[in-house]
Structures are given as structure tokens and as C-alpha cells.
Image: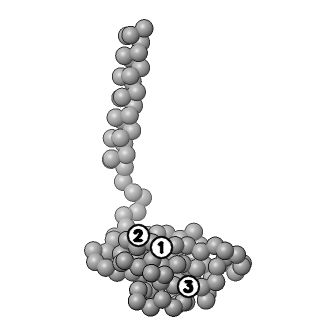
């Protein structure tokens, strides 16, 4: 019984070690280039690629983007509410509802829908 238990523990430990090694060696599908200073912006492509649209984090008004954004970075102390319709309207694109996206301070994200407007919330 003790030998069987020892084999089970050894196999479990080996499996865990293999999983940890695999996770450590795994490379992301796309390397995201993150900024090294306080900055916030939206981008037209996913993974912070494409055209950049700067965010003034001191202006808390609603802003429509010049074109749809698919990702953003917020490396500031502000939070940004992201909307999938113009005029900071909540809901799915073109459909009223309560959906919006919160981009927190010191985060970046790819959006589930193209972002059309935003508001700095604090």
C-alpha cells in the first residue's frame, strides 16, 4: 500500500512539474509592446497595434473616437469607461442596454466589440 501511494505521489509531482515547465516555456501568440511611462491611448487594432488615439485623463467629458478602437492601454492613475456606441451610450453596438467596459488604471485590454466612445471616470 505504501509503495502504491509513493508511486501516485511521484506521478502527481512529475505531472505538476511538467505543467509548470510548459507554462513557463509557453510564448504568447502576439507579443504586446507596453509603454514605459504614464500614458493612455486607444488603438485601431488588437494588441495595441494600428493607429493610436491619445486620451487626456484630466478631461472627464464624453469623447467619440475618430475611428473604432479594438484595444487600449491605461498606464495612468485614471479609470476609463469604454462604450461600444457613440456619445457614451451603453449597450451592444447599435442596441440599447447597460453594457460598457471598464478599463482600470494600469491595465490594457482588447475589447469584445469595437469601442466608439469613452469617458475618464477618475
Residue at numbered disc 3? 117
Q: Are marks 3 and 1 in contact (CB under 8 Å)?
A: no
Judge the density around disc 2: few (<14), some (14-19), many (≥20) Cα neighbours within 10 Å: some
Left or right, 52 with respect to 64, comes to left
Q: Residues within 10 Å of mark 1 (few under 14, many from 20)?
A: many
Look at the numbered discs 1 and 2 and tell me whether their residues touch, using CB distance below 8 Å.
yes
The single residue placed furthest to the top in the displayed view is 1
Q: Secondary structure at mark 1?
A: strand
Residue 59 appears in which quarter of the rendering? Answer: bottom left
Q: Which residue is mark 2?
A: 107
Foreground of the two, 79 or 42: 79
Q: In terms of image quadrants, where is residue 53?
A: bottom left
Give the residue displayed 39% in from the left and 31% down from the top.
15
**Quadrant location, the C terminus:** bottom left
Mark 2 → mark 3, Cα distance in angstroms = 18 Å
Q: CA distance from mark 3 to mark 1?
A: 13 Å
From the top left corner, tell me how far across and down residue 104 is, in percent.
45, 72
In the image, 62: left or right of 43? right
Mark 3, Cα crowd under 10 Å, few <14 / some 14-19 / many 20+, is many
Find residue 95 and report its horizontal and vertical position in percent. 72, 78
**Furthest residue in direction front, as rendered:** 122
Mark closest to the chain's N terminus, 2 or 3: 2
Corner quadrant of residue 35: bottom left
Residue in view at x 40 percent, y 73 percent: 105
Q: How many marks?
A: 3
Cα separation between marks 1 and 2: 7 Å
**Residue 43 visible in the current orientation:** no
Q: Which residue is mark 1?
A: 103
Of residues 64 and 44, the one nearer the viewer is 64
Amino acid at each position: 500500500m505504501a509503495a502504491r501511494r509513493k508511486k501516485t505521489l511521484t506521478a502527481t509531482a512529475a505531472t505538476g512539474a511538467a505543467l509548470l515547465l510548459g507554462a513557463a516555456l509557453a510564448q504568447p501568440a502576439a507579443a504586446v509592446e507596453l509603454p514605459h511611462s504614464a500614458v493612455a491611448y486607444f488603438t485601431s487594432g488588437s494588441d495595441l497595434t494600428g493607429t493610436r488615439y491619445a486620451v487626456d485623463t484630466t478631461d472627464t467629458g464624453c469623447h467619440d473616437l475618430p475611428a473604432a478602437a479594438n484595444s487600449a492601454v491605461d498606464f495612468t492613475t485614471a479609470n476609463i469607461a469604454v462604450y461600444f456606441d457613440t456619445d457614451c451610450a451603453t449597450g451592444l453596438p447599435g442596441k440599447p442596454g447597460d453594457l460598457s467596459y471598464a478599463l482600470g488604471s494600469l491595465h490594457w485590454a482588447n475589447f469584445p466589440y469595437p469601442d466608439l466612445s469613452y469617458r475618464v471616470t477618475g
